[in-house]
């Protein structure tokens, strides 16, 4: 069994971090994982995407053409990658920045106003955490308690922002459950 | 130690420290700059030396100097940078100094691109610099192996008193995978007092040591090259590493592939197995010394009708594969370069074309 | 009467391969004397260049490494960084240091690497047979400038001490000559001072030494000394260019 999740958005949206946290949680759960970034010359503002591969045996090809799921944080990402997602997958659409939809009927669309919800929670910076937890709650790819712990661990060096990110995490789960 | 999730580049930096290497000189180049960034932070914590040199040319000689006085030392770079260091590699090999060089390959020739490639096989395995020398070349296929090979590289650099190369690619450098650091490093007894310029006082000796590569007397030069050759012959006996995948099956096709490319091939092999098509993989883990006998044996298995070398290049290792198969089977090649790693689906299509 | 003259311990007893009238031998001796006087032979590592002094380790008696052309300052950096307790010096000619190795010397000096460079400037490539160097004088003949150096095509000779002086990083930069006994005594003091700065862990130190090459200049040893006095010294002014605070 292997699951692949593509995270995509603008550079600076925290895409790589969301993906890393998911990979971390899966690793803690005992899965084999790989976090495969795209990398290019642009440091800020370009498209960033990254694929997390989770499996019950050693990950073979790190190159994934058709991921199981997609977390699209901006419109170009949705337009570029929606068609690649395998049937039955989840496509998270950050509706704060994406007015369109995937035009797919064989997948589950998860509409999350990640930026708006993040602002409501306290800072737009945690939109990536909201998207992460909403996606994970819907797609059920990892244990949510472990994932929550990984998010907490990630910010252990900056304890001041832990409550904000925990609030964001719970908000994401909430949105997924109501979706 | 528990598993941690790390980028290949950072893990290589940490592996060096855990192997007792506290000296690192480098010049920034994508896609491996994270090694330098990681070590710029980490080495001062362990009382080590980090220096960003003014060029890869200079870095090559900083490595030579440090290695020559008997200290464990490493540099990392990517393809164009390794070209600049190749001069020093030739000198270091000739002067018989232990050092570890990591090449996180990117596309070439020229500036090429910054995406993963395996276009430096010839450079790493056949030369790069001038003269009769070889590097011991490891080809990891992921972050865990990159760590183990890096740590081991220091031991072997000292065992053979020569440069050892880790030949990775941009994918291995940039991807994150769980990694476990081995606790202990096996270390050969150090014989550096007999050759390193560590200072006569420190060695409590009246005999001075010379680190050099100039031998104007033909007999002396010949002797030095024979000494090097004896080391390479010993490597061929003692250091060859490879892995077989699905090689117990009655495979019709044998793939030879290494590094990131071999992982794609493994996935393709699994996909074909589900369709009832058996394909084997022979993955060299050392590129020099090359697993010659293993390739021959795997290629000449009765069920095997064809051999194919699959690389992220325009065909380099395939020349070694052909050499090892000795005309007993047809040897094909498939490769892509430019940065788009062939997908498993593409490999399946290529293999099916051979059947 | 007791012994009045002996070979420094830091010199070996080998005969040098240098041409008659060449001043490498004098500078070797000055370096060896300084090392003996400072008692640092047991922790000194020399770096040999590519050029006439490529075999200079045969004439010294302590640890030595041999660099590729121009790369001695990078090697010295590698050694000094990982073994700051060692005393490290490079011994380089003008082709090696001022041409192919310009990048390495500038950056080592600018980082303030705590080693010493002895720079032999004789305005020509010696070992390869009298080709033009970056330090060759305007109009001076060389095998690759058969009618004399044309500065319209090749620029003016590079004055390394002047150049290094301009770096903001503190260091000891001096230009000396070994054309007569008085200059030799002064050069000795400068070389010793350069090593003293290193022993104290103070700074990068650079001693340029105006030397001769009778063979490739096509002059007798005596004429070579005179030519150097008359032609080189007015352009390459002697003296301390920079002294650390």
Image (cartoon, coloured by chain):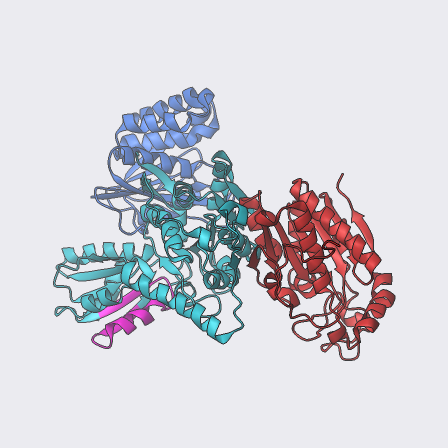
Residue B261 relative to residue C77: left or right: left
Which residue is drawn at the image coordinates 38% and 22% (left, top)?
A166
Does the segment drawn in magenta span residue B312? yes
Give how far across and how far down residue A61 sits, in percent: 29, 52
Residue A113 seen in the current view: no
Residue C27 relative to residue B299: left or right: right
Near-viewer residue (C123 or B122): C123
Give how far across and how far down residue B75 sits, in percent: 48, 51
The chain drawn blue is chain what?
A
Which residue is drawn at the image coordinates 49% and 47% (left, top)?
B203
Q: Which residues are magenta?
A: B307-333
The chain drawn cyan is chain what?
B
Q: Quadrant of the C terminus of chain C?
A: top right
Q: Quadrant of residue C183?
A: bottom right
Does the segment drawn in magenta span residue A133? no
Q: Eyeballing the image, is C14 above or below B329?
A: above
Near-viewer residue (B317 or C142): C142
Q: Quadrant of residue C215?
A: bottom right
Colour of the chain lettered C? red
Residue C115 seen in the current view: yes
């Amino acid at each position: 069994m292997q699951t692949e999740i593509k995270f995509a958005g603008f550079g600076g949206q925290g895409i790589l971090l969301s993906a890393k946290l998911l990979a971390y949680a899966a690793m803690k759960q005992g899965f084999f994982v790989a976090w495969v970034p795209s990398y290019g010359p642009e440091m800020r503002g370009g498209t960033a995407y990254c694929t997390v591969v989770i499996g019950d045996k050693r990950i073979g090809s790190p190159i994934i053409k058709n991921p199981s799921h997609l977390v699209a944080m901006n419109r170009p990402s949705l337009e570029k990658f929606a068609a690649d997602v395998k049937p039955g997958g989840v496509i998270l659409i950050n509706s704060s920045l994406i007015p369109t939809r995937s035009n797919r009927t064989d997948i589950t669309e998860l509409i999350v106003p990640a930026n708006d919800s993040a602002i409501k929670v306290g800072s737009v910076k945690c939109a990536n955490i909201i998207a992460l937890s909403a996606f994970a709650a819907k797609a059920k790819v990892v244990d949510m308690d472990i994932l929550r712990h990984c998010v907490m661990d990630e910010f252990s060096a900056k304890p001041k922002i832990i409550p904000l990110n925990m609030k964001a995490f719970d908000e994401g789960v909430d949105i997924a459950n109501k979706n | 130690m528990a598993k941690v999730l790390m980028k290949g580049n950072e893990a290589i930096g940490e592996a060096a420290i855990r192997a007792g290497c506290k000296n690192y000189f480098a010049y920034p180049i994508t896609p491996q700059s994270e090694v330098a960034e990681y070590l710029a932070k980490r080495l001062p914590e362990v009382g080590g030396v980090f220096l960003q040199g003014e060029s890869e040319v200079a870095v090559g000689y900083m490595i030579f100097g440090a290695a020559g006085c008997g200290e464990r030392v490493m540099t990392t770079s990517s393809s164009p940078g390794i070209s600049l260091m190749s001069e020093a590699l030739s000198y270091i090999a000739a002067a018989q100094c232990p050092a570890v060089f990591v090449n996180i390959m990117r596309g070439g020739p020229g500036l090429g691109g910054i995406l993963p490639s395996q276009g430096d096989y010839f450079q790493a395995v056949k030369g790069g610099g001038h003269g009769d020398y070889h590097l011991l070349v490891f080809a990891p296929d992921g972050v865990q192996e990159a760590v183990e090979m890096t740590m081991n590289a220091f031991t072997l650099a000292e065992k053979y008193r020569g440069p050892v190369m880790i030949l990775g690619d941009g994918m291995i450098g940039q991807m994150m995978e769980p990694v476990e650091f081995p606790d202990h490093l096996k270390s050969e007894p150090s014989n550096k007092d007999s050759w390193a310029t560590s200072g006569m006082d420190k060695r409590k000796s009246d005999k001075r040591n010379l680190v050099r590569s100039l031998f104007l007397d033909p007999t002396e030069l010949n002797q030095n090259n024979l000494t090097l050759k004896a080391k390479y012959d010993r490597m061929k006996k003692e250091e060859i590493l490879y892995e077989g995948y699905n090689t117990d099956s009655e495979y019709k096709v044998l793939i030879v592939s290494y590094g990131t490319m071999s992982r794609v091939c493994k996935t393709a092999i699994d996909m074909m197995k589900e369709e009832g098509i058996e394909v084997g993989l022979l993955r060299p883990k050392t590129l020099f010394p090359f697993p010659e006998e293993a390739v021959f044996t795997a290629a000449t298995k009765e069920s095997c009708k064809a051999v194919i070398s699959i690389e992220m290049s325009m065909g380099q290792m395939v020349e070694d594969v052909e050499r090892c198969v000795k005309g007993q089977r047809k040897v094909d090649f498939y490769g892509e370069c430019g940065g788009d790693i062939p997908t498993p689906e593409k490999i399946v299509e290529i293999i099916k074309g051979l059947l | 009467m007791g012994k009045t003259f002996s070979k420094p311990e830091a010199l070996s007893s080998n005969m040098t391969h240098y041409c008659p009238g060449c001043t490498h031998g004098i500078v070797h001796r000055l370096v060896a004397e300084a090392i003996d006087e400072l008692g640092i032979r047991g922790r000194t590592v020399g770096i040999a260049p590519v050029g006439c002094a490529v075999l200079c380790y045969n004439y010294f008696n302590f640890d030595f490494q041999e660099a590729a052309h121009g790369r001695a300052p990078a090697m010295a950096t590698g050694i000094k960084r990982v073994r700051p307790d060692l005393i490290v010096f490079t011994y380089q000619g003008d082709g090696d240091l001022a041409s192919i190795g310009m990048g390495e010397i500038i950056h080592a000096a600018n980082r303030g690497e705590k080693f010493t460079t002895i720079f032999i400037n004789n305005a020509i490539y010696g070992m390869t047979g009298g080709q033009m160097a970056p330090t060759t004088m305007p109009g001076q003949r060389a095998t690759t400038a058969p009618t004399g150096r044309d500065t319209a095509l090749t620029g003016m000779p590079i004055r390394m001490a002047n150049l290094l002086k301009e770096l903001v990083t503190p260091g000891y930069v001096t230009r000396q000559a070994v054309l007569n006994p008085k200059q030799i005594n002064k050069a000795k003091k400068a070389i010793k001072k350069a090593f003293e700065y290193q022993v104290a862990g103070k700074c990068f130190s650079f001693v340029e030494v105006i030397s001769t090459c009778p063979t490739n200049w096509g002059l007798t040893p005596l004429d070579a000394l005179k030519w150097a006095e008359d032609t080189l010294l007015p352009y390459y002014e002697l003296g301390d260019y920079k002294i650390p605070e």
